Amino acid sequence: MVRLLILCWVLLPLLAVMSGGVRGGEVTYDGRSLIINGERKVLFSGSIHYPRSPREMWPSLISKAKEGGLDVIQTYVFWNLHEPQPGKIENEYQMVENAFGERGPPYIKWAAEMAVGLQTGVPWVMCKQDDAPDPVINACNGRKCGETFKGPNSPNKPSIWTENWTSRYQAYGEDPIGRTADDIAFHVALWVARNGSFVNYYMYHGGTNFGREASAFVTASYYDDAPLDEYGMINQPKWGHLKELHAAIKLCSNTLLLGKAMTPLQLGPKQEAYLFAENSSEECASAFLVNKDKQNVDVVFQNSSYKLLANSISILPDCRNVKTQTNTRTRIPIMYFNASDQWEEFKEPIPNFEDTSLKSDTLLEHTDTTKDTSDYLWYSFSFQPEPSDTRAQLSVHSLGHVLHAFVNGVPVGSAHGSYKNTSFTLQTDFSLSNGINNVSLLSVMVGLPDSGAYLERKRYGPVAVSIQNKEGSMNFTNYKWGQKVGLLGENLQIYTDEGSKIIQWSKLSSSDISPPLTWYKTVFDATGEDEYVALNLNGMRKGEARVNGRSIGRYWPSLITPRGEPSQISYNIPRSFLKPTGNLLVLLEEEGGDPLSITLESVVIDSVCGKARASHYRHYNGSREAKVVHLQCAPNGYITKILFASYGTPFGGCGRDGHAIGYCDSPNSKFAAEKVSFC
């Protein structure tokens, strides 16, 4: 169960349970909508998570969200931050409820009574919980709630969409899953047409999974394709398209909330109209004309002809199909770290059995041993082979996520699982030494699971270890093991100014083969001109990067997606992390990367594009404009050049679509655009 924190620009007082709904001093709800100060409201909300953006960004994010037509900011309560020790973190419980059998429904009832009994002052919702007990509101999560939601489980509850996914988080090794502005807008309009009155965009601004906060295999960049991107910049066309949609719906909100929903009309095989009348008369005040066809269609509605674009919804009479500008984000290198004399390194020591503090007669489970204090857990044992043995094969089966193997301090192999299957087996040949041989396994977690039943029963780390030589196979699973939580560099915090002085750093190795499990350190000055900056780690392989002691997240460029490219190479550095001079950059590299390839980048919007046609309308400052293209640069930006302009029938579109002059074009198009842009 997730609490919906409604942080409106209004006061939300305490609630009390009343018959026929929930009432409070100024907040109530009924079967149509949430009610604030006695007024029904159509509310647009956006998820912005406070741990994923520094507090210095919050005013700007909230301001841009409000400008984009949002009424509400939604956030999660991050118990992994507020209660880092084992406690009570469910999310979308219905997805796992069946796993608990007959104990599931009573738990839901208890959770609802507990939550309502706290008298927090806001309504409670249960996401994806169809049987949410009164007065808790059952809500929908997903991409197409206008089509999939079964509806409120009581006529006294409104239809609430708590998570409208604007894209999807990226997982290491997986291709990105995007979502177009048109698709989001279509399903929001359909939701409202079918009596929905609250929509929350998950995410409206995703931000960054700093430190070790990302869930299993999830990248540091979180929902970068949201209306406000990872850096907090406006992402077009999503931001602008949704802004215009919000304005169009708000213009007819009184009719939607107070009028009567009429029976939908069929306008064609895949076309229908949803009507709302201000009173009991048949005269239509507002209508949603829906076209689910993949082609443009002409329809007749109330004796008028309308052209409905493919997969679109037209809102009448106040708005027709809306189109807004698109923009292109790029990264420009502003600093190179390619001088070897500016780097120092520290090789993480490899512990033997005698160096470990936790002894056992079997392999201990990874997460239960580390208590989430570190991603890393050492497993070590020693054995003495026959004098004639010179070669052997090590086999380790692990339940996740990553494993690095060392024999006598020498790296012999690495292996990892994946986002969809965390289990794997490492098999590698190695050379034996005379006498005692020391085997050290470094198990690595890449985040914890974010959902599922019986999470406390899940196991990670190595579960079976054997060595094969010419004499046969030796099983070391139940053997004398030594475990050690974390790395020395972590424990000493060598990524901080004070901690970095504790150890002896060395000059950067000149070897062509970079050693694994190595810390790299350098210092750099920050320019004051670039508002958004990122660290390009394309030459590194896997590890974690920190700036002035603050982690900007795990990196893993060596894990390639099916498309043949890294999941993420550029890592956000908020300006609040930086000082004018003397910034300390420390990286922990697990596999062996090239720090000389690292660059500091400026992240900018370098181009904008807009397209409009006769059927497009735009709402601007409360009024309706037709056939107008509005282009706007990012803050402190300005237009330097018009690359293309055509008034007529241009081909193509914005972005990757390309563009070209069509069979009809005004020869003064570019001149007119330049005159307006540069004056």
Image (cartoon, helix red, strand yellow):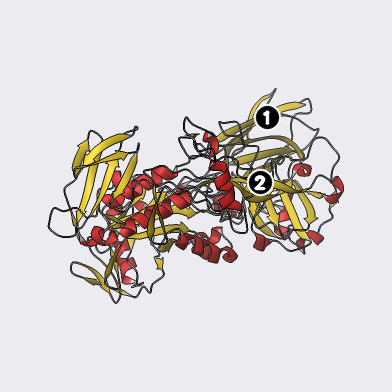
Disc 1 crowd, CA 10 A, few/some/many (<14, 14-19, 20+): some
The furthest residue to the top: 470
In depth, the one of 340 and 518 nearer the eye is 340
Judge left or right: residue 478 versus residue 322.
right
Residue 93 seen by the camera? yes
Residue 145: horizontal and vertical position, in percent?
Answer: 32, 47
Secondary structure category for the residue under label 2: strand
Q: State whether residue 7 is above or below residue 477.
A: below
In depth, the one of 109 and 293 nearer the eye is 293
Q: Earlier in the sequence, mark 2 or mark 1?
A: 2
Q: Quadrant of residue 539?
A: top right
Q: Please, what is the three-letter code of the amino acid marked with disc 2?
A: Arg
- The label on residue 639 is none
Residue 160: horizontal and vertical position, in percent?
Answer: 31, 56
- The residue that disc 1 covers is 428
Image quadrant in which the C terminus is located: bottom right
Q: CA distance from mark 2 to mark 1?
A: 40 Å
How many discs mark residues in the rendered view? 2
In depth, the one of 634 and 207 nearer the eye is 634
Image quadrant in which the N terminus is located: bottom left
- The residue that disc 2 covers is 331
In depth, the one of 558 and 591 nearer the eye is 558
